[in-house]
Image (cartoon, rainbow, N blue to C red):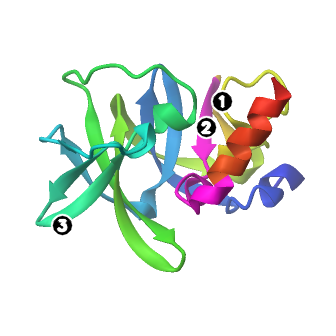
């Protein structure tokens, strides 16, 4: 196991559901995935942040729908026949919470070995490094492991990160 992997807080190996966002592959912890849905009607929330702009009905529960592309500075694209909603459970301040994540495509469930995961580099990244737990390798491809706790964590953490990013420009 690499030191960077331990530091990133990712287990020695991780079973993950891989999803596609604008041609990049992201890994979600498989144990957090509750279900994968085709596109369903979304109720937009007026004045909501772009990251979580709507809610959906999942078996009678109101579930916020997040678009990770916003958090990673990617262009938003309209849904197509491959678009799915991955419903995951995240721990928000000790409370298990269901959240829907938009995915351009759902790939597969895979095992990511700890030895293949490194910290996100400080330079040359197009994604916000503070929202990435690590970058794994599968063959010649990279798999981005997002830090879901940080992404869905307290709003102040995200705003502080944004302010820090703006100062870097």
Viewport quadrant of the C terminus: top right
Q: Which residue is drawn at the image coordinates 67% and 63% (left, top)?
A: 11
Is residue 7 at all visible to an observer of this figure?
A: yes
Mark 2 surroundings within 10 Å by alpha-carbon count, few (fewer than 14), some (14 through 19), many (20 or more): many
Please tell me whether residue 70 is drawn above or below residue 155 in the rendered image: above
Task: Name the side, left or right, on which 98 lies relative to 27.
Answer: left
The stretch in magenta equals 141-157
Please provide percent x and percent y for residue 67. Answer: 41, 38
In the image, is residue 8 part of the stretch drawn in magenta? no
Please provide percent x and percent y for residue 35. Answer: 26, 56
Name the residue carrying label 2: 144
In the image, is residue 152 part of the stretch drawn in magenta? yes
Label pair 3/1, CB-CB below 8 angstroms:
no
Name the residue carrying label 3: 61
Q: Nearer the viewer, mark 2 or mark 1?
A: 1
Secondary element at image label 3:
strand
Name the residue carrying label 1: 127
Mark 1 surroundings within 10 Å by alpha-carbon count, few (fewer than 14), some (14 through 19), many (20 or more): some
Q: Which residue is drawn at the image coordinates 43% and 64% (left, top)?
A: 31
How far apart are labels 2 and 1 at the CA level? 10 Å
How far apart are labels 3 and 1 at the CA level? 31 Å
């Amino acid at each position: 196991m690499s030191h960077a992997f331990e530091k990133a807080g990712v287990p020695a190996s991780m079973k993950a559901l891989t999803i596609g966002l604008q041609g990049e592959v992201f890994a979600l912890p498989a144990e957090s995935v509750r279900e994968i849905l085709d596109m369903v009607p979304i109720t937009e929330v007026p004045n909501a942040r772009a990251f979580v702009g709507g809610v959906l009905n999942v078996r009678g529960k109101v579930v916020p729908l997040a678009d990770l592309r916003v958090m990673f500075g990617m262009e938003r694209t309209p849904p197509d026949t491959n678009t799915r909603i991955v419903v995951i459970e995240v721990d928000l301040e000790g409370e298990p919470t269901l959240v829907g994540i938009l995915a351009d495509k759902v790939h597969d469930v895979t095992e990511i070995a700890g030895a293949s995961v490194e910290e996100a580099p400080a330079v040359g990244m197009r994604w916000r490094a503070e929202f990435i737990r690590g970058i794994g390798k599968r063959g010649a491809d990279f798999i981005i492991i997002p830090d879901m706790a940080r992404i869905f964590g307290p709003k102040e953490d995200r705003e502080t990160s944004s302010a820090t990013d703006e100062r870097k420009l």
